[in-house]
Structure formats: structure tokens, C-alpha cells
Image (spheres, grey):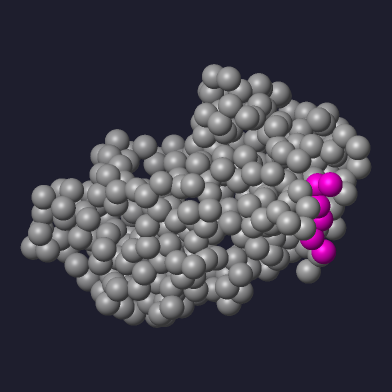
Amino acid sequence: MAAVQYAKDQPAGFKNKIEKVAIIGAAGYIGRNFTRELLKTGKHTVTALTRADSKSAIPEGVHKVVVDYDDHSSIVKALTGQDFLIITLSVRAPRDLSLKIATAAAEAGIRWIMPNAYGPNPNSQTMYDEMGFGQSYRGLMEKLHELKLNPVVLTCGFWYEFSLAGGLSRYGFDIANRKVTLFDKGDVKMYTSTLPQCGRAAAALLSLPLLPEDASSDASATLSHYTEPQPAYIRSFHVSQNDMLASLKRVTGTTDADWTITTEPSQERWANAAKALKSGGGVHLDGKTPMAPIEAFSMVMYTRIFFPGGDGLTDKDIKNGALGLPDEDLDEWTKEAVRLVQTNELATYGQ
């Protein structure tokens, strides 16, 4: 572990705070939540990097810079002078784009970065490997450290309203048709966060001092405390599928009799989806319903977090209190998931 650094020992001109923030994907599904909350602080200027052909509307108050992601010098120029880089990328983005941007950031003089790694506990190596992105995550972290970047990993679990509304392959719910597949008994709890809570967490982190002033200062109240391998663990809720089903019944005024409730063994469900993903497609456990690769990918990730033991975290790991994050109402955000289904808003995710 690296020795603790103190602000008092830094060279002349050192600023112990983040002021200028660049965001990749500022108008995207999660990026717009970061952007909105950063602007609320009044402490940050926000610059959005965007492609020339992007049709996304950049929020008011954000400086827009057009870049060519195939032109390294274009990215470097856009990032020069920034203190912090937040990367939010669509699942459809090229696999090498995140590292390409990070490399340009390092050349531009940026030393702090929030990588595109929003999800469950990355320090549960077995779980991450079995979700399918352990190796790529560790490889990215290694590269970021080689670039002398300080990765601040926001570990928020899966996004609650997005995942609940996302169909049977995610949290196991088909809200439109009132169907649910419970994994095992549906009683394993995991940590999950709403998109606005993620935005508030990012803004809170970037409002912290970078380093403790001296040895008498509280190092845990600094951004450096949350650099990889110590993620910033946050949550909105600690819930099981049964908890989510109970919430859905409350907000829709339904009972068990109105839902088709089935169960599947979590490990069999995961193994079957992993096989389908590796084969480029397959069938569900019923032996007849086709499973597309993208569905298999979701099922591998989401089913794994509901294995016995959940995500491997406890309330002691969660930093909501330290970051001043509010408590949220489960039913309010379950209503939002229902709204997302009714409006078909998720159909445009990643576009």
C-alpha cells in the first residue's frame, strides 16, 4: 500500500480540491445524473466531451467540447487543464475506448479518474470472474496505475430502477406481464442504487479534499481514501427479490394471485446462461425458450449476485453516511421502474 501523502508536502501551486471535471457521456443514462449533481454543488465547472455526430442534448451550464475518439491528440487537447475525468460509456462502445481515453487523460496531465466500472463489489474476485468481467476489470486497473492515474471506483451495485424494469434477465421481473422468476427462495439480499444516488455520490466524492492536510487530519474524509483498491461503496437499498416483489405489489395494488411466480436454482440458471453466452446463444432452463447472447450476458451478471452470500458486502462497508447521502424510499423508486416499463424508456438505453 502506498504511503499516505499530505497536502502540506505538495509542490507550490498544488490545489487540494477538484474544480474542473470532464465527463464522457454527460448526457447519457448515468452521466446526466453525475452532471446534474456536480452542477448543484457550485464547486465544479463541468466539460462534456462529445462526438461531432452526437444528437444528445448537453445539460445547460455544461461546457461542450467536440472530440474525435479516433484522434488521440483531439482527446488530449480536450482534457488538458481538467482536474478529474469521469468516464461513462454505453455497453455498445468499443471495448478499447475506455483505456484509449484514459491514456489521453494521463498525457493531458489529469491524475484522478472515475472509470467506467459502476457495479457490484469488485473486490469479490470470484464473483467478478463469474460475472464475466473480472479479468478485464483487473487489467484496466493495472493499466490506470501504470499511467499514474488515481482510479476512484464508484461501487453502487446494479442500478435499481433500471434493473427492476429491465425484464426477467436482470432482477427477474417482467413487470408488464406480471411475471417473476425467483432465484432459489428469492431471499438473498444485495446492495443496489438508484441513478440519482450515484450522481449524488459522485458529486460528494469530488467535493472532498484530495489529500489530508497533515498527519493530524482525517484521511478517510479525502478523495485519496477512495482510490482503488478501496472503492467507494454506496447504496440506495439492501434488498432481496422478495423485497422487490413486495414493493411491486404495494405500488401496483396487486397480490401474489395477480403474478405468475416461478423459481429457478440460482447456480443452474447462472451455469446455463454462461454456457449460452459462450456458445453465442442457447435456451432457457425450460429447454425450449431461445436465449440470445445479450440476454445470456445479463443473466450471467445478475443471477450471480443472488448466489448465497450476495455481493459480499455488509453495512459497515457502505459509505453513505460519510458522503452525506440521503435515505431513499423503496416504493418511490419501484414506481419509477414501473413508469420506465410503461413508457418503454429503456428502449433507447445506450443509443
- The answer to whether residue 4 is magenta is yes
User: Which stretch did the figure color magenta?
Assistant: 3-8
**What is the chief secondary structure element of the magenta stretch?**
loop
Residue 152 in the image: above or below residue 171: above
263 relative to 250 in the view: left or right = right
Q: Would residue 168 be visible to someone looking at this image?
A: yes
Foreground residue among 56 and 235: 235
For image coordinates 76% across by 48% down, the residue present is 213
Left or right position of 235 against 2: left
Q: Is residue 304 left or right of residue 26?
A: left
Q: Residue at x 67, y 50 (%)?
A: 222
Q: From the viewer's side, name the closer residue of 129 and 19.
A: 19
Instruction: Name the residue rendered at 53%, 46% in the picture.
Output: 201
Looking at the image, the residue that sits furthest to the top is: 60
Quadrant assignment, res 77: top right
Residue 307, image x, y percentages: 42, 76
